[in-house]
Image: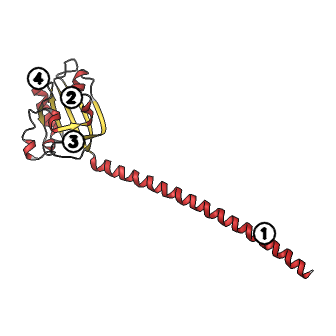
Amino acid sequence: MSVQRVLSMLERVGQVFVDPWLVVDKNGQIIEMNRHYHALFPRSVARKLRGSACCQHLKLGTCETECLARRCLRDHGHGAVRYDEIPAVLEGETDARRFIVSAVPLADSDEAEPEAVLILLRDVSDQADVQRKYQDVQTSEAREKEKLRAELLRKTKELMDANQALNRLQQELMSFKKGLLG
């Protein structure tokens, strides 16, 4: 089975994927992708995707040290990897998005050397932002709770001190009354 056969099988199965995916060859060139990957980019960029280097238009945080596709290919079929919430910058954008990225080598058989890498992407930027905001709110609420607890302790101490002072004054008053009444 050739890489073309693997790609045609992937085309049939890949139609039901709701997330972007692409296939990168041994040279790091994009040889196939689905419409969801295509839709990540403006049309002017999307037209140039096929045949371009995989990191030319999408810079994954994992590729700063070593190309994700090369890492998968180097490990001869055992290089399937997954990264959660890694930063990625798309060409034409300045802000990084967050992706769950999975990559698996594609080969004719288990014994054959991989000829390409399938990379699956899931944009979790919105969920990651919500999660970060939720954690920020929790941290802020924990600080506020701690402030309230400290204020409560301070007020309780003030109340206890006032109560002790009142008790002393009542005892002095009682002693004074006894002295007057005799």
Q: Tell me the crowding category of disc 3: few under 14, some 14 to 19, or many 20 or more residues within 10 angstroms, Cα based.
A: some
Query: Rounded to the nearest whole Å, what is the CA distance between mark 4 and mark 2?
Result: 19 Å
Q: Which residue is mark 4?
A: 2
Q: Is residue 26 above or below residue 158?
A: above
Q: Which residue is mark 3?
A: 89
Q: Secondary structure at mark 3?
A: strand
- Amino acid type assigned to the residue bearing label 1 in the image: Arg
Left or right of 149? Residue 102 is left
Contact between labelled residues 4 and 3, with CB atoms less than 8 Å apart: no
| Residue sitting at x 77%, y 70% | 167
Q: Secondary structure at mark 1?
A: helix
| Residue sitting at x 24%, y 42% | 122
Q: Is residue 86 above or below residue 164?
A: above
Q: Nearer the viewer, mark 4 or mark 2?
A: 2
Q: Is residue 89 above or below residue 27?
A: below
Q: Which residue is mark 1?
A: 168
Q: Earlier in the sequence, mark 3 or mark 2?
A: 2
Q: Residue 159: x and y, percent?
A: 66, 66
Q: Tell me the crowding category of disc 2: few under 14, some 14 to 19, or many 20 or more residues within 10 angstroms, Cα based.
A: many
Q: Earlier in the sequence, mark 3 or mark 4?
A: 4
Q: Nearer the viewer, mark 3 or mark 2?
A: 3
Query: Rounded to the nearest whole Å, what is the CA distance between mark 3 and mark 1?
Result: 71 Å
- Amino acid type assigned to the residue bearing label 2 in the image: Ala
Q: Earlier in the sequence, mark 1 or mark 4?
A: 4
Q: Secondary structure at mark 4?
A: loop
